[in-house]
């Protein structure tokens, strides 16, 4: 079992896939551990990627500091993992809180990575997300990891997936209870609730960035993803149809397909960026399509955008 030393602490990590393939580092969500990446990791490996995944401090089999876990320490761990992979193009993909750690790394060390993929992530914690986080921390304190997972499953997945995978949920809950520690997770949540906004620093990210968001994600709504798109210059947002918060588990092959095409575009100098908005395909092999310009991409139902005075003048001239 591979271990990495970072500031006198042990970090558990895993490597998979061809050593000469494009590299992708996966950064866990708040209550995740490395095994939950396996379906997505295996889909990336099948596309020729060399994949690194790891348990952050306080998670899984990595060391669990007994007190507050600073986000800066998590960024340092990510930096050590990236350094271990050597001098080659490296893509970093983080989901939810892991996306925050990836964003923070890109703000300080964007020149070290070839591409950035924040998934279901955020740079601000508005009141709704803060209160959800506080409720999850209370649930963890009063009911333990089993209660927290019972709460998170319906927040992260579609009803169809939950019905189809019902036989796995009890097993996943049991593993989560064995692998994750109540007090360590509580410390991690403290760092989440003590969050400092990153929005003002996002324009310093020059790294090509693909922001992935699920159409039906209500834990981190599209407005939070759109703020990333609006402030990161070489970014584009891709909306995954019929996807929820944890789409790397629910739609691993599709997500791997999109990440592989992103890597190909970046390495081939074709990444469109320009803060554009796209709709992802529903099946592997499909194409990205531009979000219709006449509609508001922040609405859940098709609503035509209000036309500004300059736009009215342009329409009148064109007519």
Image: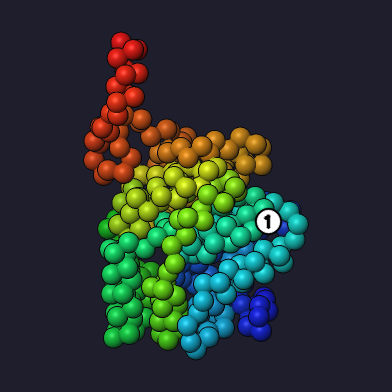
Residue 12 image point, x, y percent? 61, 76
Within-10-Å neighbours for mark 1: few <14, some 14–19, many 20+: some
Q: Residue furthest right?
A: 87
Residue at 51%, 37% (x, y): give it.
274
Q: Quadrant of the N terminus?
A: bottom right
Q: In which quarter of the image is the C terminus?
A: top left
Of residues 259 and 202, the one drawn nearer to the viewer in this rendering: 202
User: Is 165 above or below relative to 46?
Assistant: below
User: Is 285 above or below relative to 255?
Assistant: above
Residue at 58%, 57% (x, y): give it.
106
Residue at 61%, 67% (x, y): give it.
78
Of residues 53 and 164, the one drawn nearer to the viewer in this rendering: 53
Instruction: Say which residue label 1 marks.
Output: 112
Residue 201 image point, x, y percent? 51, 56
Residue at 47%, 40% (x, y): give it.
275
User: Does 286 sit left or right of 270 as displayed?
Assistant: left
């Amino acid at each position: 079992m591979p271990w990495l030393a970072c500031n006198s602490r042990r970090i558990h990590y895993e490597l998979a896939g061809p050593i000469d393939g494009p590299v992708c580092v996966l950064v866990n969500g708040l209550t995740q551990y490395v095994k939950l990446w396996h379906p997505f990791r295996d889909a990336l490996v099948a596309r020729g990627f060399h994949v690194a995944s790891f348990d952050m401090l306080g998670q899984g089999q990595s060391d669990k500091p007994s007190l507050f876990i600073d986000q800066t320490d998590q960024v340092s761990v990510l930096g050590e993992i990236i350094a271990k992979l050597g001098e080659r193009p490296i893509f970093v993909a983080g989901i939810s809180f892991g996306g925050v750690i990836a964003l923070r790394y890109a703000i300080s060390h964007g020149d070290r990575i070839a591409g950035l993929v924040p998934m279901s992530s955020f740079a601000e914690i508005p009141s709704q997300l803060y209160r959800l986080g506080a409720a999850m921390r209370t649930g963890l304190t009063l009911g333990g990891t089993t209660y927290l997972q019972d709460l998170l499953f319906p927040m992260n997945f579609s009803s169809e997936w939950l019905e189809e995978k019902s036989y796995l949920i009890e097993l996943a809950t049991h593993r989560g209870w064995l692998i994750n520690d109540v007090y360590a997770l509580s410390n991690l949540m403290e760092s989440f609730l003590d969050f400092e906004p990153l929005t003002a620093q996002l324009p310093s990210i020059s790294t090509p960035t693909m922001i992935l968001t699920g159409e039906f994600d209500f834990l981190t709504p599209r407005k939070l993803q759109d703020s990333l798109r609006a402030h990161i210059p070489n970014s584009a947002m891709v909306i995954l149809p019929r996807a929820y918060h944890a789409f790397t588990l629910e739609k691993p092959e599709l997500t791997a397909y999109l990440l592989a095409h992103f890597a190909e575009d970046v390495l081939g100098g074709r990444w469109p960026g320009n803060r554009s908005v796209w709709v992802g395909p529903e099946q592997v092999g499909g194409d990205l399509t531009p979000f219709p310009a006449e509609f508001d991409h922040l609405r859940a139902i098709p609503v035509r955008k209000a036309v500004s005075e300059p736009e009215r003048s342009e329409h009148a001239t064109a007519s």
